[in-house]
Amino acid sequence: MLAQRTLKTLTQAVGVGLHSGQRVELTLRPARPDTGIVFRRVDLPDPVDIPVSAQAVTDTRLASTISRGQAKVHTVEHLMSACAGLGIDNLYVDITAEEVPILDGSASSFVYLLQSAGIELQNAPKRFLRVLETVEVSEGQGDNVKWARLEPYDGYRLSFEIDFKHPAVDSTGQQVVFDMAHGTYARDIARARTFGFTKDVEMMRSNGLALGGGLDNAIVMDDYKVLNSDGLRYDDEFVKHKILDAMGDLFLLGQPMLAAYAAFRSGHAMNNQLLRALLARPQAYEVVTFADETKAPAGLAWVQPAW
């Protein structure tokens, strides 16, 4: 049986929120089979559990935010991406503020936390949502078009193309294809950092955003070049971060997918629109398990190694 996964023990981290600048403590705890991933606001007078789901996403400006009632958690996508990359099904995320800490701006710190806690197989079958029909969302026309698509595929593959028309970005790789069957998430994707432009950062800070951002947790560019003294971690780090984000956004579905995802200039909003469009068409998907894990698509049955 291809089994569900959780952590062997709890693990903790302390950091600041990218947009809020608030100090936040994060505790990742094991959860029973079929729990899913649940964020818990433990700083509130009465702690509130927010299970992840496509419908729980209530804001996609600059990051993915999930809510339940008045309780919110912002910027969940990097942690969710790490969970997707390592195949974590069940997890409690205790958090002491309303934004996940940005740490180094990538998912690699979350990968380290999850792997240091140890990954435990559980006595319950892992459930995949298998895409049966192509689903696509798009907006804009001509030079402003952007789109995202899910297609049937025996495995999990993501393809992304960017178009920023900025000299520092244009000089790097513009398109990446990552297939769980052939790549290693922790090595190939997880280290790609979020990025921004100085002109946008100044505007965001005037609006009370990006208060925790800086050169130690993001790639920052002026009108011409990357300002980080250590340069880029990958030759195509910008588009790889878009793959990282997409993996986190899509895992907000609440279960892993068997599908091929492709996107052009997509973002958090369009990724969530794509999930909702899929769920609105029950004939376009089915839920499957693998009684014999050797029958599962390559790359999804084994625990991803460290880089």
Image: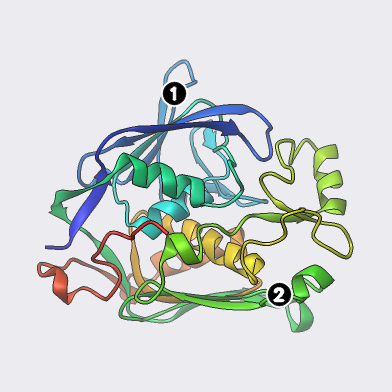
Residue sitting at 32 percent across and 33 percent down?
A: 10
Residue most extreme to the front: 230
Q: Which residue is mark 2?
A: 172
Badge 2 element? loop
Q: Which corner quadrant holds the N terminus?
A: bottom left
At label 1, the amino acid type is Val
Q: As rendered, which of 238 and 252 lies closer to the eye?
A: 238
Percent of width and height locating residue 216: 69, 44
Q: Which residue is mark 1?
A: 42
Residue sitting at 40 percent across and 59 percent down?
A: 85
Percent of width and height locating residue 230: 72, 55
In the image, is 49 to the left or to the right of 141? left
Q: Callout 2 environment at 10 Å: few (<14), some (14 to 19), or many (20+)?
A: some
Residue 47, above or below 224: above
Q: CA distance from mark 2 to mark 1?
A: 42 Å
Residue sitting at 78 percent across and 81 percent down?
A: 143
Q: Quadrant of residue 11?
A: top left
Q: Quadrant of residue 231?
A: bottom right
Coloured how?
Answer: rainbow
Q: As rendered, which of 5 and 204 lies closer to the eye?
A: 5
| First of labels 2, 1 by sequence position | 1
At label 2, the amino acid type is Thr
Q: Is residue 56 visible?
A: no
Badge 1 element? loop
